Image (tube, rainbow, N blue to C red):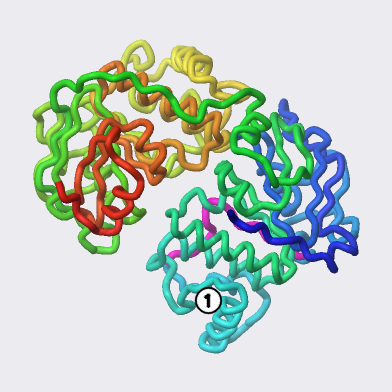
Amino acid sequence: MTSHPPPNAVANAVANAVEMKDIVIRFPGVLANDHVNLTLKHGEIHALLGENGAGKSTLMSALAGLYKPTSGTMRIHGELVDFNSPKDAIAKGIGMVYQHFMLVPTQTVTENILLGLNEPKFFMDLPKYDQKIRDLQEQFGLNVDPTAKIWQLSVGEQQRVEILKTLYRGASVLIMDEPTAVLAPQEIDDLMETMRSMTKQDKSIIFISHKLNEVTAVANRLTVLRKGVATAEGIDVTGMTSEKLAELMVGRKVVFRVEKKEQAPGDVVLDVKEVSAINNKGVRALNKLSLKVRQGEILGIAGVAGNGQSELAEIITGLRDCDGEILINGEDVSNQEPSVAIAQGVAHIPEDRTGVGSAPNMTIAENTIMKNYRDEPIGTKWSINFTEARDHARELKNAYDILAPNVRTMARKLSGGNLQKVILAREITTNPKLMVAMQPTRGLDVGAIESIQRLLLEQREEGTAILLISEELEELLTLSDRIAVLHEGEVMGILDAKDANMKEIGLMMTGEKHKA
C-alpha cells in the first residue's frame, strides 16, 4: 500500500498555503468557475479532478496570474493577493508546470532554467550555474544533465527541467497540470517519488490528473469540479475508490471496461513488410519491422515511449520516408504524399492533437472539413460553401457530443477531450478502411475515454482495420484483438489479446522476444 506524504504539522499551525474562496470566472457566454473554494495546506498534495472542460485549468490559471477572477478572493500564506500577471504570482511563490512544455529545444537545461530571469545580466558563467542546478537537483532528486540540450532529453527528463525552473524561481506552491499524461510507467513512478520528496521540504502541490489510480496513490485530499461547480471540496483521499471518484467527476456511474463483440477478421488491409526508418535525430527507429492488420480487427502496439511507435504511424500515413513496403488494400503507399494514403481510405488520429491533428486558430467547422472541403456539397468548383460546412459541423457536434458554444468556436479554445472528438468526427465521417490511432485517449477524463473507446469499437464492428498505438496497457488489453510489442524498432512478438498478460508484455517491452 502506498504511503501518502503527511502534511507538515508545524507549518499547518499557521496559515494555509493557498485559500481560494468563492471564485467566479466568466467569459463571454461561458461561466467557467461558479463560486469555487479550494484550500491547499502546507506540505500536502491536493488533487484537482474533473472532466475535460470542467474548469480546472481556468481555476489554476487564475492562481498562476493568467486570468483575473470575476469575483472571489485568493490568499497565499494568509496574505490577500490580486494578481495582474504571472510575474506577480511567481513573486508570491506560485509555479505552474504545464502539460505542454515551454522549453527551447536548442538550448541547454541550465540556459532554459535561467531564461527570463534578471540574473545573470551581462555575462553568463555557465559552469557556475550548471553547479547551482546540480545542487538543486540533488536536493529534490531531479536528475538531469544541466549541460544537455533539451532536444536530447526524454519526455520525462524535459518535465524535470520544467519542475526545476519553478523551484529555481523559489516556488513554494507548485501547480502540476496533467504531469503524467506524456510519461511512461517508470517515469510516472519517478515523478511520484519527486512529489513526495518536495512535500517533505514544505512544498505544497496542486495535482491535476485524470488518472484516478495516481490520485489515490499520491494525494492527501482532493477537490472535484463538474461544469465549473465543486461537487467535492477538500475531502480526504483515504478509502476513496476510482469508481467513486469517477462518479463525482461525471455525475453517473462509469463503466471502466467496455464490451467488445467477438468477430472474425476479414481480408488484410495493412501489410507492412520489412520496413526500416530513421527518426528526427538521425537514429534508426524501425528495423525491418513487419505486421498485418485485417478488416474488423484492432492490432494494438505496445512499447515504452520512443521505441518506434511514432515513426510507425508516420510512415503509414505518409509523414515519414522509409525503406521497405507499406501496402494498403494491396497498393504500395510507401514514401508517397499523405494524400495517397487518404485516397486509400486511411484515417489518422495523431499523437499531437494540437500541432498535427488540428489547426488551433481555425473554427470547429473549418477543422471538420479538412478532408472533404473539395467534395460537394461543401466544395463547389473553386470555392467552399461555408453554409454547408457549418451545417455539416453542427451535425457532427451533436452526434459526437462536442461541448462548445457553437461551430464557429476556435479549436484552441476546446478542452483536450472535445478537440479529440472533433478529430475523430472528421476522420470517421470519411468511412475509413484503415484507422491509425496514436494515443487516442491520452490526457482525457474517464467519461471522454469511455466515449472514444466505444467509437473505436464501433469502427471495428463496421469492418475498419485499426492500428491502435497506446502506452496504456489496460486499454490495449481491453480493445485489441492482437497486441504487437515493439522494442528499439523491432517486433518482439504478437500475442492474442485474450491470452496476453501484463507481465509477459512487460518483459517483451524490455527487449525479451516472445518464445512462441
Q: Position of residue 186 (x, y in %)?
A: 44, 59
Most foreground residue, 82 or 263: 263
Most foreground residue, 43 or 321: 43
Q: Is residue 99 magenta?
A: yes
Q: Which residue is mark 1?
A: 110
SS type, badge 1? helix
Task: Identify which residue is drawn at 16% across, 55% down.
Answer: 287
Is 83 on the left-hand or right-hand side of 419?
A: right
Most foreground residue, 388 or 480: 480
Task: Identify which residue is drawn at 30% across, 17% down.
Answer: 461
Is residue 202 visible in the rendered image? The answer is yes
Q: What range of the chain is rendered magenta? A: 93-105
In terms of secondary structure, what is the magenta stretch mainly?
loop
Q: Position of residue 94 (x, y in %)?
A: 73, 61
Task: Identify which residue is drawn at 47% across, 17% down.
Answer: 396
Vertical order, 21 against 362 (above or below):
below
